[in-house]
Image (spheres, rainbow, N blue to C red):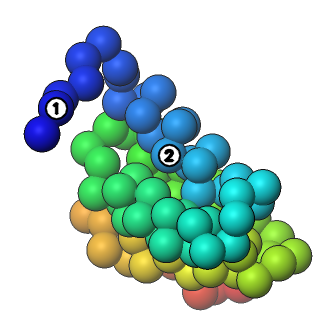
Amino acid sequence: MRWLTGVSGRETVAFLQALALDESLDVDIRTPLSSATVRAIALHRDPTAVPALMAMAETKPVSPHLTRIRREAMQGLGQSADPRALEFLAGIIAK
């Protein structure tokens, strides 16, 4: 295993989010990769992880890929102990 240094949590979350939403990747790679990156964001301790999941959960599902991302993001928020995630999900349920 090799640790990368000099990369902030914010940069990591932003990179993972961009990778998850990248629809230019081959579909055989995109599906497992995007699921793994959303799960990695959900497990991330940086404070920007929850807002990134919320943004992905709010994406308009115009493709099966984005629908999958949205579902994964909602699952990540549901497993979060962050009060912002609970508030976000409660707001969706109240709609």
Q: Say whether residue 57 is left or right of residue 10.
A: right
Image vertical order of residue 18 relative to residue 65, above or below? above
Alpha-carbon neighbours of circle 1 within 10 Å: few (<14), some, or many (≥20)?
A: few
Q: Which mark is residue 2?
A: 1
Q: Is residue 86 in view? A: no
The quadrant of the image that shows the N terminus is top left
Name the residue located 26 percent from the left edge and 64 percent from the top edge: 81
Image vertical order of residue 47 relative to residue 59, above or below? above
* Viewer-closest of 56 and 95: 56
| Residue positioned most to the top | 6
In the image, what residue type sits under mark 1?
Arg
When asked about the image quadrant of residue 77, the answer is bottom left
Name the residue located 70 percent from the left edge and 65 percent from the top edge: 26
In the image, what residue type sits under mark 2?
Leu
Q: Could you tell which of marks 1 and 2 lies nearer the N-terminus?
A: 1
Tag 2's secondary structure?
A: helix
| Residue positioned most to the left | 1
Alpha-carbon neighbours of circle 2 within 10 Å: few (<14), some, or many (≥20)?
A: many
Q: Say whether residue 74 is left or right of residue 62.
A: left
Label 1 – label 2 distance at C-alpha: 18 Å
Image depth: mark 1 or mark 2 in front: 1
Tag 1's secondary structure?
A: loop
Query: Residue 55: x percent and y percent?
Result: 64, 55
Query: Residue 71: x percent and y percent?
Result: 57, 81
Name the residue located 61 percent from the left edge and 74 percent from the top edge: 28
Query: Residue 34: x percent and y percent?
Result: 54, 64
| Residue positioned most to the right | 62
When asked about the image quadrant of residue 85, the answer is bottom left
Q: Which mark is residue 16?
A: 2
* Viewer-closest of 68 and 24: 24
